[in-house]
Amino acid sequence: MELSKIKFACLDTETTGLSPDDGGRICELAVSVSQGGRPGVEEFSTLLNPGMPMHPEVIAIHGITNEMVASAPKFADILPKLLGLLDDCVIVAHNADFDVNFLRSEFAQCGMRFPPYPVIDTLKLARKSGKFAKNNLGCIAADLGINCAGWHRAMADTKMAEQIFYYFLTELNKHGVSTLEQLSSFQQKRWKDLIKEN
């Protein structure tokens, strides 16, 4: 499928821990849908009540306190909205496995299976490109001159990842990458090898 026709849903989660396998839950979620190179076609961001207290070391990372989420909706409350946003989209995230694992767990707790959305991971693209000294979100954004204000809050991270994603799309378009299948290959192999083959 041609990239210009695809809806991309860039998203980020903030969580109570490092893994849903250890009981971690999502405490903030943000999504920004783009299409045809137009970011922010539709945006959604919300704090979520994880139903559990957060430890001080977690709060120190994202700044979301127990008081802030006490009256926030639960994940089940926003699930219909989220499904509507992600419908017919390709998910984009930085370190996407982290976010998708948490989303899969939250869906399961609601008695649902997380749909098999195609996923593009800007972390994998960064690693395979070999362009950056450090591949974390903030460092890549800083290298590209993207505003890092609010790093570790869901919408700020979503917008950073979205801009990084479109940077990669622009760079890869110069090498003839115009379909989702071609883009997916660039997160699996070193760019220089794929470009040489093309």
Image: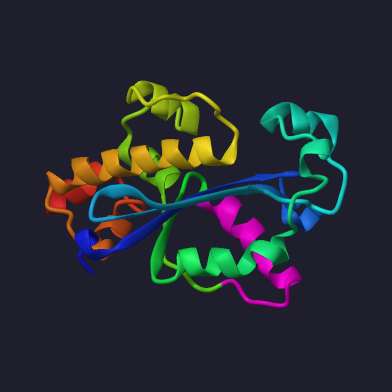
Q: Nearer the viewer, residue 112 or 143?
A: 112
**Where, quadrant-wise, is the C terminus in this rendering?**
bottom left
Residue 129 magenta-highlighted: no
Query: At 48% from the left edge and 27% from the top edge, which residue is drawn?
Result: 138
Rendered view: 22 above or below 179: above
Q: Is residue 99 magenta?
A: yes
How many marks the image carries: the answer is 0
Q: For the view shown, which residue lies furthest in the front direction?
A: 71
Residue 124, above or below 142:
below
Q: Quadrant of residue 4?
A: bottom left
Whether residue 107 can be seen here: yes
Residue located 66% across and 57% down the image = 102
Q: Position of residue 105 (x, y in %)?
A: 70, 64
Question: Does the magenta stretch mainly form a helix, a strand or a loop?
Answer: helix
Q: Is residue 54 left or right of residue 45?
A: right
Q: Position of residue 69 (x, y in %)?
A: 77, 44
Question: Relative to residue 153, is residue 27 drawn left or right?
Answer: right
Q: Quadrant of the N terminus?
A: bottom left
- Tell me the residue at 79%/34% (across/down): 65
- In the rendered view, how is the structure colored? rainbow
Which residue is at a point 80% across and 29% down the rendered structure image?
57
From this viewpoint, is residue 136 visible? no
Residue 17: x and y in percent read 75, 44
144 to the left or right of 160: left
Magenta stretch: give its range.
96-114
Q: Residue furthest right?
A: 53
- Residue 188 sits in quarter: bottom left
Q: Position of residue 191 (x, y in %)?
A: 25, 44
Compared to 115, does 147 lie above or below?
above
